[in-house]
Amino acid sequence: MRARSTRKKRSAPPQGLSARLLSHVTLDARTGEDIVAGVDSFSFGLGKFSAGAVERARDLRAGLPLRSFASPSRTIDKEIHLLVRRLAARGLVEYRLGRSHRKDEVVIEPQLPDYWPQMPKLRDTDALVLSRFAYMRRRADEMVLESPRSGALFKIYHQKIAAMLATLAVPRRIKQLRQQTGFPGVELLALLVDCHILFKVDAAKDKGLRPTEGDGNLVLWDFHDFLFHTRSTEGRHANPVGGLYSYVDVIPSLPAVRPSWPGERIDLRQLSAAAAEAMSPAVKLLRERHSTRDFDDRHPITLSELARFLDATARVRSTLRAPLDPDGDGGGPMLEYTVRPYPSGGASYELELYLAVNKCEGLPRGFYHYDAGEHALVPISVRAPEFEALLKAAEFATGAAAAPQILITIAARFGRVSWKYGSIAYSLILKDSGVLTQTLYLIATDMGLGGCAIGPANIDLFAKMTGMDFHVEGPVGQFALGRGATSAALR
């Protein structure tokens, strides 16, 4: 069943909140022509706008108050709202909050393309507390407040605001906060509630601890695991991902092979040498394994081959039940386990396979879940733009000439592991993903198919496609599969 939509109704923007272009963005606005935004050597057309809207758009450099174009009745207001929305969708604007026009107090930096400032209603009697996932840190010469749950981060420029936020380690009513020197206004508190950095509690009964943050599935997440999951994947932050060579001008690359330790060597080469024909099938398979990024789309993988591949790599072989009896008194619940072809920490087997089928003989193009217990594929209805975006991202990540024939997304049911293992849960999930990926490689090699592991996965896109919250079940790896292309097939 799909999760209910969390889309909020549009509310009136708070006083003092304005949208402005990022400092490195240019805006070329000419009457009768497209308004064009530029970032470095890239440019984006934003559409044609009236002369009045073009003139007003020039003020986005310094910042336009959101309230100034919130009216739906004026044509220019509608145009400016549309323009800012288009800029925001590309991550080209930020939102400034401050009572002085000259000095920033807080700047909101979107982390999701569909982020738009919202201000839920708050009363003086409401008690607020910091989320346990919220944290403040130094970034260059800025102090930023953020959370892996949030669609934006907050740059804090006033030390009294930072001090006030620190007091919210325990629940406090808004009327108490108003009495503090430098109270920044209820608008900031509302924006932080909207971003799940603050949340409301019953101050008389609730200390704002783990079980009360509004979602039972969050109880199973520790802070470090949740942050690692969102920052090591795409979709929940605005940072570059992938092979960036960030330190090429700072320090040299480490050598491919570690320099030898000093001391007398024991040479193993003579002892391990063996003729190719004497190698075991397992050793030969390991040596033949390699990444395949280009596929022969004139002869795609068949449904029969896909069935054999999934049977050999991920199918449930058997199930068993055993009691949880840590105290030896026989009072624990019965737990269910499965046996599958690859190892898993504590026999958790939390990993699920979702297949974006691009080209497969005998199987319609679409998005499927592999039911490992029933050895069956179940189609999932998804929007075409999201499906194409998933395949396009895989094509880009592998540097291939076309999308893979089948893109397998390895997703984790996080609670299956964290219920038992707590603080080491995400580490175990990544290890499980690694051994499953190696299993996929070896079986693909054994079947004469091609495969390639893919590092980044967009957890927000997956959530939109499946309707599941990203912290309930989400991607931890991807694998491209198909019939590998020969050099002749590539011509």
Image (spheres, rainbow, N blue to C red):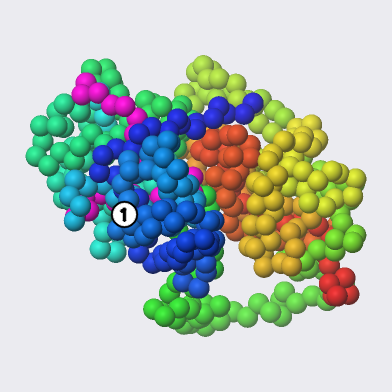
Side of 440 where 42 appears, left or right: left
Residue 465 in view here:
yes
- Taken as a whole, is the magenta stretch helix, strand or loop? loop
Residue linked to disc 1: 63
Is 432 drawn above or below residue 185 in the view shown? below
Q: Residue at x 41, y 53 (%)?
A: 52
Mark 1 lies on a secondary structure that is loop
Observer-nearest of 147 and 238: 238
Residue 312 in view here:
no
Specify the quadrant of the image occupied by residue 174.
top left
Observer-nearest of 14 and 298: 14
Q: Amino acid at mark 1?
A: Gly
Side of 410 where 288 appears, left or right: right
Residue 154 lies in the magenta-colored region: no
Image quadrant occupied by the C terminus: bottom right
Is 202 drawn above or below residue 380 in the view shown? above
Residue 124 lies in the magenta-colored region: yes
Q: Residue at x 37, y 25 (%)?
A: 212
Magenta segment: 103-125
Is 315 drawn above or below residue 125 in the view shown? below
Percent x, y for residue 465? 63, 40
Percent x, y for residue 403? 74, 59
Side of 41 where 312 appears, left or right: right
Percent x, y for residue 276? 84, 74
Q: Residue at x 79, y 75 (%)?
A: 274
Give the crowd class for mark 1: few <14, some 14-19, many >=20 residues within 10 Å: many
Image quadrant occupied by the N terminus: top right
Percent x, y for residue 93? 40, 55
